[in-house]
Image (spheres, grey):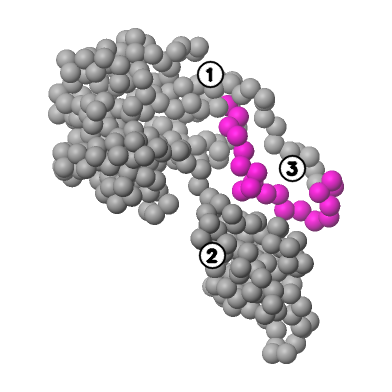
Amino acid sequence: MQATKQKMAKLSHADKMRIQTLHEQGMGAKAIKSAYPEKQWNLNTLKTICRRIDRTGSAAERKAGSGRPMSARLADNIIKVQELICSQEDAPGTSKSTRQIAQEVGISARSVRRIAKIDLNLSAFKRMPVQIISDATKLKRLSRSKQLLRRLTVQKTKRVFFTDEKLFYVNPPVNSQNNRVWSTGRKRDVNQERLLVQRAKFSPSVMVSAGICYGGKGRLHFVAEKAKINAEYYVTNLLPKLVEDSQNLTPDFIFQQDGVPAHTARQAQQWLRENSPDFITKDEWPPNPPDLNPLDYHIWGAMLEKYEKHTPKPKNKAELKMVLEAIWADLPQEPIDRAVLSFRRRLRACIRADGGHFEHQL
């Protein structure tokens, strides 16, 4: 009975202000509910409050004409903010941050965000770090994407065994922008165990090599410590294991690898001609390929996400290997299959972008 009363309890003003802060930072009703399960907030109530924030700029419901009159969201300020916040559309890279706009206009950064969201109906998008692609590389990406799209039908794509290598750290870098601690009082009063994230300057790491295909995944292979992945090491220690994984999953596989020097070396290309039924040659795979390899655009990210949630964290390389093997074994196959099938869609997107960046359009 007590639990029922708690669920139906009216949200306090402090709760509404916390919800407003979270929503203004980009969180939706479901995310807010998940972040505070102990509050037992009703999802429909949260959705109503989020809509109210979008509509009025406030989580608290007010009667018409009540409250303090607007002092920042005035017509002149809205015009100034619009001029400054949209300046990059005609001159990319010249836009100013919310804080810079606030200083120039003479209002708070919070007011700038409200003007952008409520008065200008703008949405905020995170910038995506990408590699520089030269014009010559774009032409290669365009022509090779067209070639692969013609060659790899949906059925043939299911036979492709995608491979890649990845470096994993015992203490991976932390994105401080998305790693917040909520507390009352001042920052200096927060328990340091909650606020500080310790990370060694040179965190121990291991390099892994693996492959996946529609309907299955191979084993996780660890590169020997201090080994340099040149053509000789790749052909001697990794390729035979990866091809064995391919054969165990689909006998008529098409082997895929990206364009790093160890893969494109004559020794590696010749080994694949002699030991695989089919493979994508160095002159067929598009350069700058992280946006076209399912391991890059799905698998490694899924593993890192699971690793961040894993407790207790490993303390050394041996423990890190055990954790990575467990995560790899538990990766569900359905998302892997979807990632493989999206390969052709990404080839088409690369073609539409004339060989340039396209992930921001997906």
Q: Is residue 134 above or below residue 86?
A: above
Q: Where is the N terminus found, in terms of image quarters?
A: bottom right
Q: Nearer the viewer, mark 2 or mark 3?
A: 2
Judge by depth and name the residue closer to the eye, 124 or 299. 124
Which range is magenta?
Answer: 170-189
Q: Earlier in the sequence, mark 1 or mark 3?
A: 3
Kindly identify which numbered label has been placed on residue 195: 3
Kind of residue indicated by mark 3: Leu
Give the SS element for disc 2: loop
Residue positioned 61% across, 48% down in the render? 178
Magenta stretch, main secondary structure, is: loop
What's the distance in space between the residues labelled 1 and 3, CA to CA? 28 Å
Name the residue beneath numbered marker 2. Answer: 123
Kind of residue indicated by mark 1: Ala
Instruction: Answer with the quarter of the image where residue 60 lies.
Output: bottom right
Give the SS element for disc 1: helix
Residue 90, x across and y down, in percent: 51, 60
**Does residue 175 belong to the magenta stretch?**
yes
**Does residue 74 belong to the magenta stretch?**
no
Residue positioned 84% across, 46% down in the render? 188
Neighbourhood count class around disc 3 (C-alpha, 10 Å): few under 14, some 14–19, many 20 upward: some
Residue positioned 19% across, 39% down in the render? 147
Q: How many marks?
A: 3
What's the distance in space between the residues labelled 1 and 2, CA to CA? 45 Å
Name the residue beneath numbered marker 1. Answer: 318
